[in-house]
Amino acid sequence: MPSAFERLQRRIRRREARVAILGLGYVGLPLAVTLAEAGFHVLGLDRDPKRRATLRAGRSYIPDVPSRTVKGLLGQRQLRVADRPAALGPADVVIICVPTPLSKTREPDLTDLLEAVSTVARHLHPPALVILESTTYPGTTDEVVRRFFEEAGRRLDHDVFLAFSPERIDPGNLRFGLRAIPKLVGGVTPKATRLAECLYRQALDQVVPVSSSRVAEMAKLLENTFRIINIALANEFALLCHALGVDVWEVIEAASTKPFGFMPFYPGPGIGGHCIPSDPLYLSWRARAEGVEARLIDLAAQINNRMPHHVVERVGDLLNARGTAMKGARILVIGAAYKRDVNDTRESPALAILHLLAQRGARVAYHDPFVPLVQLNGTAWRSTPLTPEAVKAKDCVVIATDHSGVGYRLLGRHATFIFDTRNAMRAVEPAQATVVRL
Protein backbone atom coordinates (compact mmCIF):
# COMPACT_ATOMS: atom_id res chain seq x y z
CA MET A 1 0.00 0.00 0.00
CA PRO A 2 1.44 3.43 -0.95
CA SER A 3 2.58 5.61 1.96
CA ALA A 4 1.01 8.99 2.75
CA PHE A 5 4.04 10.63 1.13
CA GLU A 6 3.68 8.60 -2.07
CA ARG A 7 -0.07 9.22 -2.33
CA LEU A 8 0.36 12.95 -1.88
CA GLN A 9 3.30 13.13 -4.28
CA ARG A 10 1.29 11.30 -6.94
CA ARG A 11 -1.67 13.67 -6.58
CA ILE A 12 0.63 16.69 -6.89
CA ARG A 13 2.43 15.33 -9.96
CA ARG A 14 -0.89 14.61 -11.66
CA ARG A 15 -2.10 18.08 -10.62
CA GLU A 16 -5.03 16.44 -8.89
CA ALA A 17 -4.06 17.92 -5.52
CA ARG A 18 -6.48 20.50 -4.16
CA VAL A 19 -4.63 23.64 -3.13
CA ALA A 20 -5.81 26.18 -0.54
CA ILE A 21 -4.11 29.53 -0.09
CA LEU A 22 -4.64 31.62 3.05
CA GLY A 23 -4.21 35.32 2.33
CA LEU A 24 -4.95 36.78 -1.11
CA GLY A 25 -2.73 39.84 -1.07
CA TYR A 26 0.34 40.73 -3.15
CA VAL A 27 1.79 37.25 -2.56
CA GLY A 28 -1.24 34.99 -2.26
CA LEU A 29 -3.31 36.14 -5.23
CA PRO A 30 -0.56 35.90 -7.89
CA LEU A 31 0.38 32.48 -6.50
CA ALA A 32 -3.24 31.30 -6.54
CA VAL A 33 -3.62 32.42 -10.16
CA THR A 34 -0.33 30.83 -11.22
CA LEU A 35 -1.18 27.45 -9.67
CA ALA A 36 -4.71 27.56 -11.09
CA GLU A 37 -3.32 28.30 -14.56
CA ALA A 38 -1.02 25.28 -14.14
CA GLY A 39 -4.08 23.06 -13.73
CA PHE A 40 -4.58 22.85 -9.96
CA HIS A 41 -7.96 23.51 -8.38
CA VAL A 42 -7.24 26.39 -6.03
CA LEU A 43 -9.29 27.69 -3.12
CA GLY A 44 -8.39 31.17 -1.89
CA LEU A 45 -9.33 32.29 1.63
CA ASP A 46 -9.14 35.85 2.87
CA ARG A 47 -10.71 37.59 5.86
CA ASP A 48 -11.26 40.85 3.97
CA PRO A 49 -14.87 40.89 2.66
CA LYS A 50 -14.01 43.62 0.15
CA ARG A 51 -11.28 41.48 -1.40
CA ARG A 52 -13.56 38.46 -1.58
CA ALA A 53 -16.37 40.44 -3.20
CA THR A 54 -13.98 42.00 -5.73
CA LEU A 55 -12.56 38.62 -6.76
CA ARG A 56 -15.96 36.95 -6.96
CA ALA A 57 -16.99 39.71 -9.34
CA GLY A 58 -14.04 38.76 -11.55
CA ARG A 59 -11.95 41.83 -10.74
CA SER A 60 -8.36 41.98 -9.57
CA TYR A 61 -6.99 44.51 -7.07
CA ILE A 62 -3.36 43.57 -7.82
CA PRO A 63 -1.91 45.40 -10.86
CA ASP A 64 0.21 42.38 -11.86
CA VAL A 65 -2.86 40.10 -12.01
CA PRO A 66 -5.24 40.96 -14.91
CA SER A 67 -8.95 40.94 -14.11
CA ARG A 68 -9.63 38.92 -17.27
CA THR A 69 -7.39 36.16 -15.90
CA VAL A 70 -9.25 36.07 -12.59
CA LYS A 71 -12.62 36.06 -14.33
CA GLY A 72 -11.57 33.24 -16.65
CA LEU A 73 -10.26 31.02 -13.85
CA LEU A 74 -13.41 31.59 -11.80
CA GLY A 75 -15.53 30.66 -14.80
CA GLN A 76 -13.53 27.45 -15.30
CA ARG A 77 -13.84 26.62 -11.58
CA GLN A 78 -10.04 26.42 -11.35
CA LEU A 79 -10.18 29.20 -8.76
CA ARG A 80 -12.70 29.64 -5.96
CA VAL A 81 -12.90 32.16 -3.12
CA ALA A 82 -14.11 31.36 0.40
CA ASP A 83 -14.12 32.75 3.91
CA ARG A 84 -15.09 29.72 6.00
CA PRO A 85 -12.14 27.89 7.60
CA ALA A 86 -14.02 24.61 7.26
CA ALA A 87 -13.48 24.89 3.51
CA LEU A 88 -9.85 23.91 4.18
CA GLY A 89 -10.86 20.36 5.04
CA PRO A 90 -10.51 18.73 1.60
CA ALA A 91 -7.21 20.51 0.77
CA ASP A 92 -4.16 18.40 -0.03
CA VAL A 93 -1.87 21.45 0.02
CA VAL A 94 -2.21 24.59 2.15
CA ILE A 95 -0.01 27.62 1.51
CA ILE A 96 0.01 30.40 4.12
CA CYS A 97 0.58 33.91 2.74
CA VAL A 98 -0.67 36.15 5.56
CA PRO A 99 0.96 39.42 6.71
CA THR A 100 3.80 39.33 9.24
CA PRO A 101 4.31 43.01 10.12
CA LEU A 102 6.32 44.62 12.88
CA SER A 103 4.62 45.77 16.06
CA LYS A 104 4.72 49.36 17.30
CA THR A 105 7.83 48.40 19.27
CA ARG A 106 9.47 47.13 16.04
CA GLU A 107 9.22 43.47 17.04
CA PRO A 108 7.75 40.60 14.97
CA ASP A 109 3.96 40.50 15.06
CA LEU A 110 2.94 36.93 14.24
CA THR A 111 -0.72 37.38 15.21
CA ASP A 112 -2.13 36.67 11.74
CA LEU A 113 0.33 33.87 11.12
CA LEU A 114 -0.41 32.05 14.37
CA GLU A 115 -4.14 32.39 13.80
CA ALA A 116 -3.78 30.96 10.29
CA VAL A 117 -1.65 28.04 11.48
CA SER A 118 -4.10 27.30 14.29
CA THR A 119 -6.97 27.29 11.80
CA VAL A 120 -5.14 24.95 9.44
CA ALA A 121 -4.18 22.57 12.26
CA ARG A 122 -7.83 22.30 13.33
CA HIS A 123 -9.40 21.81 9.93
CA LEU A 124 -6.78 19.97 7.88
CA HIS A 125 -7.61 16.52 6.55
CA PRO A 126 -4.42 14.36 6.46
CA PRO A 127 -2.21 13.73 4.67
CA ALA A 128 -1.43 17.27 3.58
CA LEU A 129 1.48 19.50 2.67
CA VAL A 130 1.58 22.83 4.51
CA ILE A 131 3.90 25.55 3.19
CA LEU A 132 4.61 28.84 4.90
CA GLU A 133 5.45 31.73 2.52
CA SER A 134 5.03 34.60 5.00
CA THR A 135 8.42 36.10 5.85
CA THR A 136 9.51 35.43 9.40
CA TYR A 137 12.53 34.76 11.59
CA PRO A 138 14.65 31.58 11.35
CA GLY A 139 13.12 28.73 13.32
CA THR A 140 9.48 29.75 12.94
CA THR A 141 8.51 26.79 10.75
CA ASP A 142 10.27 24.02 12.64
CA GLU A 143 9.60 25.43 16.10
CA VAL A 144 6.41 27.51 16.21
CA VAL A 145 4.40 26.10 13.29
CA ARG A 146 5.45 22.52 13.96
CA ARG A 147 4.27 22.76 17.59
CA PHE A 148 0.72 23.70 16.52
CA PHE A 149 0.39 20.54 14.46
CA GLU A 150 1.97 18.28 17.04
CA GLU A 151 -0.34 19.62 19.74
CA ALA A 152 -3.27 18.89 17.41
CA GLY A 153 -2.09 15.29 17.20
CA ARG A 154 -0.71 15.55 13.66
CA ARG A 155 2.34 13.39 12.96
CA LEU A 156 5.13 14.80 10.80
CA ASP A 157 5.75 12.93 7.54
CA HIS A 158 2.51 11.03 7.97
CA ASP A 159 -0.38 13.42 8.64
CA VAL A 160 1.37 16.65 7.72
CA PHE A 161 4.49 17.69 5.81
CA LEU A 162 5.82 21.15 6.75
CA ALA A 163 7.96 23.42 4.56
CA PHE A 164 8.98 27.05 4.14
CA SER A 165 9.24 28.74 0.75
CA PRO A 166 9.97 32.48 0.87
CA GLU A 167 7.96 34.73 -1.37
CA ARG A 168 10.13 36.70 -3.79
CA ILE A 169 7.50 38.65 -5.68
CA ASP A 170 8.57 42.07 -6.96
CA PRO A 171 5.34 44.01 -7.68
CA GLY A 172 5.48 46.00 -10.90
CA ASN A 173 8.50 44.10 -12.26
CA LEU A 174 7.62 43.23 -15.85
CA ARG A 175 10.89 41.38 -16.45
CA PHE A 176 10.71 38.95 -13.54
CA GLY A 177 7.18 37.71 -12.93
CA LEU A 178 6.33 34.98 -10.47
CA ARG A 179 7.05 32.10 -12.85
CA ALA A 180 10.51 33.40 -13.76
CA ILE A 181 11.79 33.91 -10.21
CA PRO A 182 13.67 30.86 -8.82
CA LYS A 183 11.70 29.38 -5.92
CA LEU A 184 13.51 28.35 -2.75
CA VAL A 185 12.03 25.49 -0.73
CA GLY A 186 13.17 24.05 2.58
CA GLY A 187 11.24 21.47 4.56
CA VAL A 188 11.23 20.60 8.24
CA THR A 189 12.00 17.09 6.94
CA PRO A 190 13.54 15.89 3.64
CA LYS A 191 10.19 14.45 2.55
CA ALA A 192 8.50 17.82 3.07
CA THR A 193 11.21 19.46 0.92
CA ARG A 194 10.60 16.95 -1.86
CA LEU A 195 6.83 17.50 -1.81
CA ALA A 196 7.15 21.30 -1.83
CA GLU A 197 9.68 21.08 -4.66
CA CYS A 198 7.32 18.79 -6.57
CA LEU A 199 4.42 21.24 -6.18
CA TYR A 200 6.24 24.35 -7.37
CA ARG A 201 7.87 22.54 -10.29
CA GLN A 202 4.40 22.05 -11.79
CA ALA A 203 3.97 25.83 -12.18
CA LEU A 204 7.33 27.64 -11.98
CA ASP A 205 10.42 27.67 -14.19
CA GLN A 206 13.02 26.88 -11.52
CA VAL A 207 12.84 25.45 -8.00
CA VAL A 208 15.87 25.41 -5.68
CA PRO A 209 15.67 22.99 -2.72
CA VAL A 210 17.77 23.73 0.36
CA SER A 211 18.63 21.55 3.34
CA SER A 212 16.10 22.90 5.85
CA SER A 213 13.32 25.37 6.52
CA ARG A 214 15.78 27.46 8.57
CA VAL A 215 18.09 27.89 5.59
CA ALA A 216 15.16 29.02 3.44
CA GLU A 217 13.99 31.45 6.15
CA MET A 218 17.50 32.86 6.58
CA ALA A 219 18.05 33.19 2.82
CA LYS A 220 14.98 35.42 2.52
CA LEU A 221 16.24 37.66 5.30
CA LEU A 222 19.70 37.85 3.73
CA GLU A 223 18.19 38.98 0.41
CA ASN A 224 16.37 41.91 1.97
CA THR A 225 19.14 42.72 4.45
CA PHE A 226 21.46 43.06 1.45
CA ARG A 227 19.02 45.55 -0.03
CA ILE A 228 18.34 47.62 3.09
CA ILE A 229 22.07 48.05 3.73
CA ASN A 230 22.95 48.97 0.15
CA ILE A 231 20.03 51.41 -0.10
CA ALA A 232 21.20 52.97 3.15
CA LEU A 233 24.69 53.31 1.67
CA ALA A 234 23.25 55.05 -1.40
CA ASN A 235 21.17 57.36 0.82
CA GLU A 236 24.18 58.21 2.97
CA PHE A 237 26.19 58.90 -0.17
CA ALA A 238 23.41 61.27 -1.29
CA LEU A 239 23.77 63.21 1.97
CA LEU A 240 27.55 63.30 1.64
CA CYS A 241 27.38 64.39 -2.00
CA HIS A 242 24.95 67.18 -1.12
CA ALA A 243 27.32 68.44 1.58
CA LEU A 244 30.25 68.31 -0.84
CA GLY A 245 28.40 69.83 -3.80
CA VAL A 246 28.65 66.67 -5.95
CA ASP A 247 25.87 65.09 -8.06
CA VAL A 248 25.23 61.68 -6.47
CA TRP A 249 23.40 60.40 -9.56
CA GLU A 250 26.43 61.10 -11.76
CA VAL A 251 28.68 59.45 -9.15
CA ILE A 252 26.59 56.25 -9.22
CA GLU A 253 26.50 56.27 -13.03
CA ALA A 254 30.28 56.66 -13.12
CA ALA A 255 30.86 53.85 -10.61
CA SER A 256 28.49 51.59 -12.57
CA THR A 257 30.88 51.54 -15.53
CA LYS A 258 33.07 49.09 -13.58
CA PRO A 259 32.13 45.65 -14.93
CA PHE A 260 32.87 43.79 -11.68
CA GLY A 261 32.82 44.39 -7.94
CA PHE A 262 30.07 47.02 -8.00
CA MET A 263 26.28 46.87 -8.13
CA PRO A 264 24.33 50.13 -8.38
CA PHE A 265 21.76 51.04 -5.72
CA TYR A 266 20.03 54.40 -5.77
CA PRO A 267 19.05 56.94 -3.12
CA GLY A 268 15.45 57.97 -2.56
CA PRO A 269 12.98 59.43 -0.10
CA GLY A 270 13.04 56.31 2.11
CA ILE A 271 12.03 52.66 1.90
CA GLY A 272 8.57 51.12 1.85
CA GLY A 273 6.52 48.03 1.16
CA HIS A 274 6.34 45.01 3.43
CA CYS A 275 9.73 43.43 2.84
CA ILE A 276 12.66 45.83 3.06
CA PRO A 277 11.51 47.94 6.05
CA SER A 278 10.55 44.93 8.17
CA ASP A 279 12.28 41.69 7.13
CA PRO A 280 15.82 42.64 8.23
CA LEU A 281 14.42 43.74 11.59
CA TYR A 282 13.05 40.23 12.08
CA LEU A 283 16.64 39.03 11.85
CA SER A 284 17.84 41.81 14.14
CA TRP A 285 15.21 40.85 16.73
CA ARG A 286 16.14 37.17 16.51
CA ALA A 287 19.83 38.02 16.85
CA ARG A 288 19.18 39.97 20.06
CA ALA A 289 17.31 36.99 21.46
CA GLU A 290 20.51 34.99 20.92
CA GLY A 291 22.68 37.67 22.54
CA VAL A 292 24.06 39.02 19.23
CA GLU A 293 23.81 42.62 17.99
CA ALA A 294 22.98 43.18 14.31
CA ARG A 295 24.46 46.67 14.35
CA LEU A 296 24.76 47.14 10.59
CA ILE A 297 21.07 46.28 10.08
CA ASP A 298 19.92 48.66 12.81
CA LEU A 299 22.09 51.49 11.49
CA ALA A 300 20.83 50.97 7.92
CA ALA A 301 17.23 51.13 9.16
CA GLN A 302 17.98 54.41 10.97
CA ILE A 303 19.52 55.98 7.85
CA ASN A 304 16.64 54.96 5.61
CA ASN A 305 13.96 55.98 8.13
CA ARG A 306 15.56 59.41 8.33
CA MET A 307 15.21 60.12 4.59
CA PRO A 308 11.61 61.48 4.59
CA HIS A 309 12.71 64.02 7.22
CA HIS A 310 15.71 64.96 5.09
CA VAL A 311 13.46 65.49 2.06
CA VAL A 312 11.14 67.80 3.98
CA GLU A 313 14.07 69.74 5.43
CA ARG A 314 15.57 70.20 1.96
CA VAL A 315 12.23 71.35 0.57
CA GLY A 316 11.91 73.86 3.43
CA ASP A 317 15.41 75.22 2.83
CA LEU A 318 14.86 75.49 -0.92
CA LEU A 319 11.52 77.27 -0.44
CA ASN A 320 13.12 79.71 2.00
CA ALA A 321 15.84 80.44 -0.55
CA ARG A 322 13.06 81.36 -3.00
CA GLY A 323 11.39 83.65 -0.45
CA THR A 324 8.53 81.27 0.38
CA ALA A 325 7.82 80.02 3.89
CA MET A 326 6.95 76.36 4.41
CA LYS A 327 3.86 77.35 6.39
CA GLY A 328 1.14 78.02 3.87
CA ALA A 329 3.22 76.86 0.89
CA ARG A 330 1.22 75.02 -1.78
CA ILE A 331 2.98 71.72 -2.40
CA LEU A 332 2.06 68.86 -4.73
CA VAL A 333 3.58 65.46 -3.93
CA ILE A 334 3.84 63.07 -6.86
CA GLY A 335 3.19 59.57 -5.59
CA ALA A 336 1.63 57.86 -2.60
CA ALA A 337 2.69 54.26 -3.34
CA TYR A 338 6.02 53.08 -2.00
CA LYS A 339 7.45 52.23 -5.45
CA ARG A 340 6.90 52.73 -9.16
CA ASP A 341 3.76 51.40 -10.88
CA VAL A 342 2.11 49.68 -7.90
CA ASN A 343 -0.84 50.66 -5.71
CA ASP A 344 0.76 49.48 -2.45
CA THR A 345 1.14 52.21 0.19
CA ARG A 346 2.47 50.04 3.03
CA GLU A 347 5.29 51.87 4.84
CA SER A 348 5.42 54.31 1.93
CA PRO A 349 7.91 57.17 2.42
CA ALA A 350 5.62 59.31 0.25
CA LEU A 351 2.95 59.16 2.96
CA ALA A 352 5.54 60.10 5.58
CA ILE A 353 6.50 63.11 3.46
CA LEU A 354 2.85 64.14 3.08
CA HIS A 355 2.40 63.91 6.84
CA LEU A 356 5.58 65.85 7.68
CA LEU A 357 4.81 68.62 5.16
CA ALA A 358 1.28 69.02 6.51
CA GLN A 359 2.64 68.98 10.06
CA ARG A 360 4.84 71.95 9.18
CA GLY A 361 1.88 73.94 7.90
CA ALA A 362 2.14 73.37 4.14
CA ARG A 363 -1.02 73.12 2.04
CA VAL A 364 -0.38 69.68 0.59
CA ALA A 365 -1.99 67.66 -2.19
CA TYR A 366 -0.85 64.50 -3.93
CA HIS A 367 -1.18 62.87 -7.33
CA ASP A 368 -0.91 59.11 -7.89
CA PRO A 369 -2.52 57.29 -10.86
CA PHE A 370 -2.46 54.02 -8.89
CA VAL A 371 -3.72 55.29 -5.52
CA PRO A 372 -6.93 57.35 -5.83
CA LEU A 373 -7.49 57.59 -2.06
CA VAL A 374 -5.36 57.37 1.08
CA GLN A 375 -6.23 57.54 4.75
CA LEU A 376 -3.72 59.70 6.60
CA ASN A 377 -4.08 60.65 10.26
CA GLY A 378 -7.78 59.90 10.16
CA THR A 379 -8.37 62.04 7.09
CA ALA A 380 -9.21 60.85 3.59
CA TRP A 381 -6.94 62.33 0.91
CA ARG A 382 -7.88 62.08 -2.75
CA SER A 383 -5.48 62.15 -5.66
CA THR A 384 -5.38 65.51 -7.45
CA PRO A 385 -5.68 65.35 -11.26
CA LEU A 386 -2.43 66.36 -12.93
CA THR A 387 -3.35 69.37 -15.07
CA PRO A 388 -1.35 72.42 -16.15
CA GLU A 389 -3.57 74.61 -13.95
CA ALA A 390 -3.05 72.41 -10.87
CA VAL A 391 0.73 72.36 -11.39
CA LYS A 392 1.01 76.12 -12.00
CA ALA A 393 -0.88 76.82 -8.78
CA LYS A 394 1.79 75.11 -6.64
CA ASP A 395 4.86 76.66 -5.07
CA CYS A 396 6.66 73.33 -5.24
CA VAL A 397 6.30 69.84 -6.67
CA VAL A 398 7.97 66.96 -4.81
CA ILE A 399 8.48 63.74 -6.81
CA ALA A 400 8.34 60.97 -4.19
CA THR A 401 7.36 58.05 -6.45
CA ASP A 402 8.47 57.81 -10.08
CA HIS A 403 5.44 56.14 -11.69
CA SER A 404 6.06 55.59 -15.40
CA GLY A 405 2.70 57.05 -16.44
CA VAL A 406 3.12 60.46 -14.79
CA GLY A 407 3.34 63.48 -17.11
CA TYR A 408 6.87 64.59 -16.33
CA ARG A 409 7.01 66.81 -19.42
CA LEU A 410 3.87 68.54 -18.15
CA LEU A 411 5.59 69.08 -14.81
CA GLY A 412 8.69 70.42 -16.52
CA ARG A 413 6.65 72.89 -18.58
CA HIS A 414 4.29 74.18 -15.90
CA ALA A 415 5.87 73.76 -12.46
CA THR A 416 7.84 76.58 -10.90
CA PHE A 417 10.10 74.42 -8.77
CA ILE A 418 10.52 70.64 -8.56
CA PHE A 419 12.36 68.67 -5.89
CA ASP A 420 13.06 65.29 -7.48
CA THR A 421 13.89 62.46 -5.04
CA ARG A 422 13.93 59.76 -7.74
CA ASN A 423 15.84 61.39 -10.62
CA ALA A 424 12.61 61.09 -12.63
CA MET A 425 13.17 64.38 -14.49
CA ARG A 426 16.47 63.28 -16.03
CA ALA A 427 14.82 62.37 -19.35
CA VAL A 428 12.90 65.65 -19.74
CA GLU A 429 15.52 68.20 -18.82
CA PRO A 430 16.15 70.95 -19.62
CA ALA A 431 12.75 71.97 -18.33
CA GLN A 432 11.30 75.41 -17.70
CA ALA A 433 10.91 74.49 -14.07
CA THR A 434 13.81 74.71 -11.63
CA VAL A 435 14.64 71.08 -10.90
CA VAL A 436 16.66 70.15 -7.83
CA ARG A 437 17.57 66.48 -7.38
CA LEU A 438 18.08 64.63 -4.13
Image: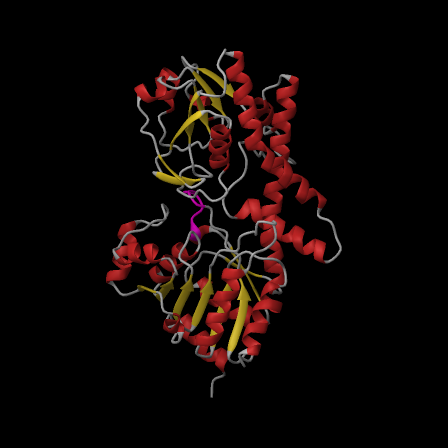
Residue at horizontal 47 percent and vertical 34 percent from the top: 350
Task: Residue 289: give x, y in percent of width and height.
Answer: 71, 57
For residue 123, above or below residue 184? below
State the image quarter where residue 143 is shown. Answer: bottom right
Residue at horizontal 35 percent and vertical 39 percent from the top: 373
Residue at horizontal 59 percent and vertical 55 percent from the top: 108
Task: Residue 404: give x, y in percent of width and height.
Answer: 39, 32
Q: Is residue 156 visible?
A: no
Q: Is residue 435 visible?
A: yes
Q: Main secondary structure of the magenta part?
A: loop
Query: Can you say which quadrant of the picture contains the C terminus?
Result: top right
Relative depth, front residue between 74 and 148: 148
Magenta span of residues: 171-178
Residue closest to the far right? 291
Relative depth, front residue between 343 and 372: 372
Question: Does residue 63 appear to the left or right of 400 in the view shown?
Answer: left
Relative depth, front residue between 319 and 192: 319
